[in-house]
Amino acid sequence: MPWSLRDSLEWGRHLTGRKAANAWRIWSSFRQANRSGDPRIQGLPVTISFEPTTACNLRCPECPSGLRSFTRPTGNLKADLFQRVIDELAPDLWGLTFYFQGEPYINPGFLDMVAHARQRGIYTATSTNAHFLDEEKAEATVRSGLSRLIISLDGTTQDTYAQYRREGHLDQVIAGTERIVKWKRKLRSRTPHVVFQFLVVRPNEHQVPEARQLARRLGVDALWLKTAQIYDPRDDHPLIPTQDKYSRYRRNAHGVWEVKNA
């Protein structure tokens, strides 16, 4: 994750003495556990992750939600459960991520949850395919106090974009991004920190320079390049990039694909 001064300052605004002390307890007890082999950890979570929903509107080929292949039920996070956990952890909790494998905006109570976490002094981040960012949702997103908004941009032309974001529409992604940037300016809000995340796969690796240009043109705060997880890496896989710097995999001494840092 590339470093950003503005985003780092936003993290800092949510730090209190109690949260810092809790983080120190976690870190020091972890170090002690490594030395002693006794896995007793002191403190409460510094950051946590909530998945607002397991549902998604797209059919991405390397995602359990897109493939509709979950072994767990599809559904939405309940607001009462979320609020109960947040209220219990809030004094020590520094950050919260609102995403995993579903599209957060499908949950109708998602932005209310963001606002609740923000009111409790917690840094919040989410990731979206941006297909639900109409005027109302864009304004509500900025007003919610969301700290960071990651938008999936996996191509700069519709043909390329749709090779991974199946059933997706690039024009909706661009329009949704423009609305977020517009409402940030209109409300004079420093948040959310808007990030284009570009999942680099073979069909789009040649468009990385164009993605940088598009991010600048739209007023996006940052562009992140992300390597793709492939469930069945092989020589003829259509998504493994040809450029090694964009690939999560390499061939080992036996010619078999493996994760680089395995």
Image: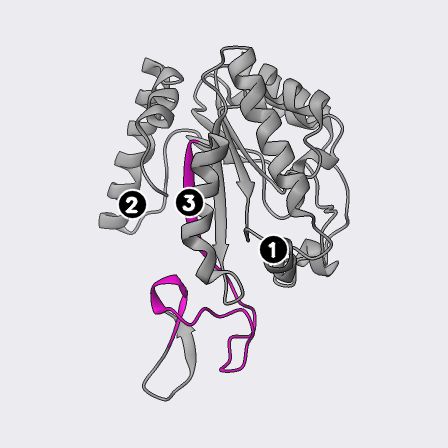
- Res. 262 visible in picture: no
The residue at which mark 1 appears reads as: 161
Q: Which numbered tag is attached to residue 151? A: none
Image spot of residue 69 (x, y percent): 73, 61
In this rendering, position of residue 60 left or right of residue 217? right
Going from N to C along the chain, the mark reached first, 1 or 3, is: 1
Q: What element carries label 2?
A: helix
Can you identify the residue that label 3 sits on? Answer: 212
Q: Quadrant of the C terminus?
A: bottom left
* Cα–Cα gap, marks 1 and 3: 15 Å
Callout 3, which amino acid?
Answer: Arg
Question: Of the residues shown, which amino acid type is indicated by label 2?
Answer: Ala
Name the amino acid type tagged 1.
Tyr
- Considering depth in this image, is 201 or 123 the residue closer to the camera? 201
Q: Was residue 191 drawn as part of the magenta stretch in this picture?
A: no
Over which residues does the magenta segment extend? Answer: 221-250
Helix, strand or loop status at disc 3: helix
Task: Give SS at disc 1.
Answer: helix
Q: Is 227 a magenta residue? A: yes
Residue 133 versus residue 250 in the image, above or below:
above
